[in-house]
Amino acid sequence: MIKVDDIHKSFGEAHILKGVSTQFEKGKTNLIIGQSGSGKTVFLKCLLGLFSPDKGNIIYNGKIYRNLTGDQQRNLRQEIGMVFQGSALFDSMTVEENVMFPLDMFTKQSKSEMQDRVNIVLRRVNLKDAHHKYPSEISGGMQKRVAIARAIVMNPKYLFCDEPNSGLDPKTAILIDNLIHEITQEFDITTVINTHDMNSVMEIGEKIVFLKNGYKEWEGSNKEIFKTDNKAVTDFVYSSDLFKKVRQMYLEERN
Amino acid sequence: MNYIASIGSYFIMIREVFKKPTKWPIMRKLILKEIDELIYGSLGIIIFISFFIGGVVAIQTALNITNPLIPRNLIGFATRQSVILEFAPTFTSIIMAGKVGSYITSSIGTMRVTEQIDALEVMGINSLNYLVFPKIIAMLLYPFVIAIAMYVGIFGGWIAGVFGGFSSSADFVEGIQLDFIPFHVAYSFIKTIAFALIIATIPSFHGFYMRGGALEVGKASTTSFVWTSVVIIIVNYVLTQLLLG
C-alpha cells in the first residue's frame, strides 16, 4: 500500500501540487486522471522519488520515503517497476537484453536463470519472436509490452505506468490496459497509472484519483464515477457524447 | 550568474559520477564499448588529420626559409616541435571535442529526452556513474591516440618534406633529433590527460542536464562543442604557463 499525506511541490513560482492526500491499495489498479497541467506527472514523479516533495510524506508500506537512507531508498526502488509513456527502452539493447537488464544489475542469478525468467515474462506479455530485435524494429504496442516485461521481471511490489496506452490504436490500448490489470491481480501488486484515457477509467479503474489545478478534486471507483455529481469530474470524464450516453445507460440500468 | 551555477552543477556532477559504482562485470562491458566508440572509432580520422597537418607544417616551414644560411634541418625540427607541442595534443583535442564530444552529448541527451535516464534512476541505478564513468575511463587511453598522432604527424612531415623536394631525408631526420627535450613529450601527455577529462565530462554534462526534445539535443551538442573547445584552449594556456613558462 502507498499512502500519500498532504504533498506539496513547487517549481520556482509555480505551485504544482497543493496538498494531495490519498492512498493506493495493494492488488488494485489505481488511476490518476486530470487535465493536462493538473499535476499528474509531477505527482507520479514524486511517488517514484524522482522529485522530492516540498512538504508532506509518501509512505510505502509504513515506511516514510524521505526518512529512508540513500541505500534504503535505492533498495525500495528495486521493488518498483515503471512503464514510461514512451516505453524508455534502451536503444542499444535488444528486447531480451532490455528485460534482462534489471536482473543483470541487481541479482546474482546465472545467465541461464536470467534467460528463463526473461522467457517467462516475455511469454506473460504475449511477446514471441522478438527476443533479438532492437526497440526500433518493433511496433509501439510491442515496445509497451517489452516495457511492462522489464517492469515486472524483478517481481516488483509497486507498478507505475505513465500514459501506458498513449499513441496506441484502440485495440492495442485495451490489450495493454487489460494486461496491466491482470498482472496487478496475478502478482498482487500496487499499480498506479497516470492516464488521460477514458476507456481505461471505465474498464480498469478500481480506484480513481482526479486532480485539478494541483488539488485532489475527487476520488472513487469506476462504478462511483458514473454516479458522481462533481461538476469538474463529469465535465472532464463525460466530455464526449459517447461517454455521456454510456453514463446515462449505466444510470438507467441501475434505476 | 547562470555560468556560476552551471560550473557548480558540473562539479557536483563529477562528484556523483564516482558515487555508488555499477557492478564491475557490467561496468567492464561498458568501458570496453566506450573504448571501441571513443578511442578505436576515432583512430582513422586522427591518423588522417595528423598526417596532413604534419605535411602542411613541413611545407609551410620550408617555404618560409628564404635565407640560405638557415639549415635545412630546421624543417624537421619545426615539424617535430609543432606537432609534439601543439598540433597533436591541442589541435587533435579540438577535433575530438567535435567528433567524440557531440557523440557523447547527443547520445546522453537522447537518453534524457526518451526518459531512459529516468528509467535508470527509477531502478535505483546511479545514472551518472553508469553513463559517464565508463567514458572517463575510456578517455584515459587518449594519450595513446595522441602518441599515434605525434608519430603520424612527423611521418607526414617527412613524406611532404622529402617527396616534395623541400628537404633531404637525412636533414629531416637530423632536425627531428636536434635539441630534443624529453619533457616536451611529458608536457604534451599531461595536457592530453587534462583534455581527455574535459572531452569526457563537459559533453556529458550538457547531455545529462539538457531539457526539451530533439531540437534541444542538437543545440546541446553545439553548445557542448563550443564550451569544450573554450575550456581546452584555456586549460592549454594555463598548463603551458605552469609547465613551460
Image (spheres, helix red, strand yellow):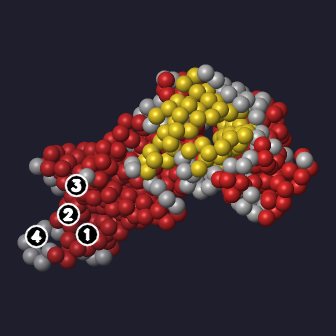
Q: Nearer the viewer, residue B106 or A37?
A: A37
Compute the Cα span from label 2 to label 4.
12 Å
Q: Please state the horizontal and vertical placement of residue B237, each as a whole percent of the image.
A: 19, 54
How many other residues sit within 10 Å of disc 4, few (<14), some (14-19) or many (≥20)? few
The chain carrying label 2 is B
In percent of the image, x 48 and y 30: which residue is there? B20
Would you name the residue on which mark 1 appears?
A: B58
Would you name the residue on which mark 3 appears?
A: B234
Classify mark 1: helix, strand or loop: helix
Eye-nearest disc, 3 or 2 = 3
Would you name the residue on which mark 2 appears?
A: B78
Labels 3 and 2 in the same subunit: yes
Compute the Cα span from label 1 to label 3.
27 Å
Classify mark 2: helix, strand or loop: helix
Give amino acid for label 4. Ile
Classify mark 4: helix, strand or loop: loop
The chain carrying label 4 is B
Place residue B133 in its image quadrant: top left
Query: Is A188 on the left or on the right of A16, as rendered?
Result: right
Say which label, 3 or 2, has the lower sequence index: 2
* Contact flag, marks 1 and 2 (Cβ < 8 Å): yes
Classify mark 3: helix, strand or loop: helix
Mark carried by residue B70: 4
